Amino acid sequence: MAIEVVVPRLGWSMEEGAFGEWLKRDGEWVEQGQALFVLEGEKSAQDIESFDAGILRIPPGAPGPGDTVKVGQVLAYLCAKDETPPFGTDAKPQAQAKADSPRKVETAAVVIEAKEKSVQHSTGAKASPRARRRAAELGIDWTSLNGTGRKGRVRERDVVAAAKSQTVSAAAQSDNDSQITRPTLAVSRLRKTIASRMMSGAHDTAPVTLTIRCDATNLVGLRTQFRAGGRDPNGVVPDYNDLIVKLTAAALERHPLLTARWSEREIVFAAQLDLAVAVDTEAGLLAPVIRDVGGLSLRDLSKEMRRLVKLARDGDLSEGDLQGGVFTITNLGMFGIDAFTPIINLPQVAILGVGAIVREPVVIDDQVVLRDRLTLSLTIDHRVVDGAPAARFLAELRQAIEQPGPWLVQ
């Protein structure tokens, strides 16, 4: 009896996604555990593995790349040898038809695959499924790009970079041609999701932002000591973001209300400190979650941070990597931003913005001295957190940043 191939649920809130592409051809034998197709959720694309073995039979009218599919929707079937697929077609699988009648006109799917193989053979170029889809959206010839992946594989970031380069060139040309058509950038599913979440964070909460200035001189000194002490066997040296995430977790342990979430009937407190950290990627802003930050050593936190950042920038995060955070930290200091108004990442009730560390003259004991200064911006949902407890949390976090040693060994 044929086995249904259905759309799985990638995350607890997922009800639908976008079909990416088949990784196996109609009529091809599929082993249990082999990647069968690509499914795009709200923030990531995943290769979906087959739970069973059989011959893949894709019915006419099956979803194509970019089509919206719902959780539980039947996409295709896995059949036994010589089994008739349940959609009642007499057509032979593409793979079998090609073997039986090599002189017959090939199907569109086989022609496309043959062309792609021909292109790869002649150019030596290969591209990931995400890169090919993005290239089609942006009108970029990916076969002409130099890939940054393994063995020169073209990745999505390479396509986006090429599109940006073309946009700059087009803008420069417009100075000489007033009739030029302005270039456009397709709005991706991720960009739409980010826009929707930002609108919800701004309009479905009662946001209030507080700022506080910190003396970061000792934090800078500690970071310098880590660098001077050399890397650990895994080549990891904690950076400022690692230190701030760890210190924030220590302060949050004393202020659990900042990690709660709002519901109409009750305020639900977090079971552990799973903190989301914003990462800037070419595909958009992502916030992978570091689990149980309070239970991690600083070195382990640094390793986990680098692992998640790499996955985010390579486009390999899973839906699970992006869910379950109870508090978000976003750092714009590397761009020279001092203070800003971060938007709450629902269903969380608070988000911390970290600004640049700037060396400034300050007065200490009637003496003007140079100190490293840092601004923190905390946005809270006033439905859950009032100004006073938010201010107390910021005051303790400032203490942790100004005297980091004792807080890191608690």
Image (cartoon, grey):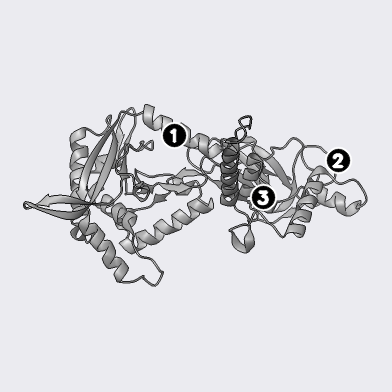
Separation (CA) of disc 3 from disc 2:
37 Å
Q: Earlier in the sequence, mark 1 or mark 2?
A: 2
Residue 53 placement: quadrant: bottom right
209 on left or right of 176: left
| Residue wearing tag 3 | 142
Mark 1 packing: few (<14 Cα in 10 Å), some, or many (20+)? some
Q: Position of residue 383 (x, y in %)?
A: 28, 29
* Residue at 38% from the left image edge and 36% from the top image edge: 347
In contact (CB < 8 Å): disc 1 and disc 3: no
Label 3 vs 2, first from the N-terminus: 2
Mark 1 secondary-structure assignment: helix
For numbered disc 2, what is the local secondary structure?
loop
Please, what is the three-letter code of the amino acid marked with disc 1? Arg
Q: Which mark is residue 90?
A: 2
Q: Which labelled disc corresponds to residue 197?
A: 1
**Which callout, 1 or 3, points at the residue further toward the start of the chain?**
3
Q: Along the horizontal axis of the image, is 321 left or right of 1? A: left
Mark 1 or 2: the one toward you: 1
Label 2 neighbourhood size at 10 Å, few (<14), some (14-19), many (20+)?
Answer: few
Q: Is residue 410 visible?
A: no
Say which of marks 3 and 2 sits in front.
3
Q: Are marks 1 and 2 in contact (CB under 8 Å)?
A: no
At horizontal 86% and vertical 51% (from top left) the residue drawn is 98
Camera-nearest label, 1 or 3: 3
Q: Note whether residue 215 is visible.
A: yes
2 in relation to 247, above or below: above
| Distance of label 1 from label 2 (alpha carbons) | 47 Å
Q: Can you say which quadrant of the picture contains the C terminus?
A: bottom left
Where residue 340 sits: x, y (%)? 32, 39
Q: Which amino acid does the dot numbered 2 rest on? A: Asp
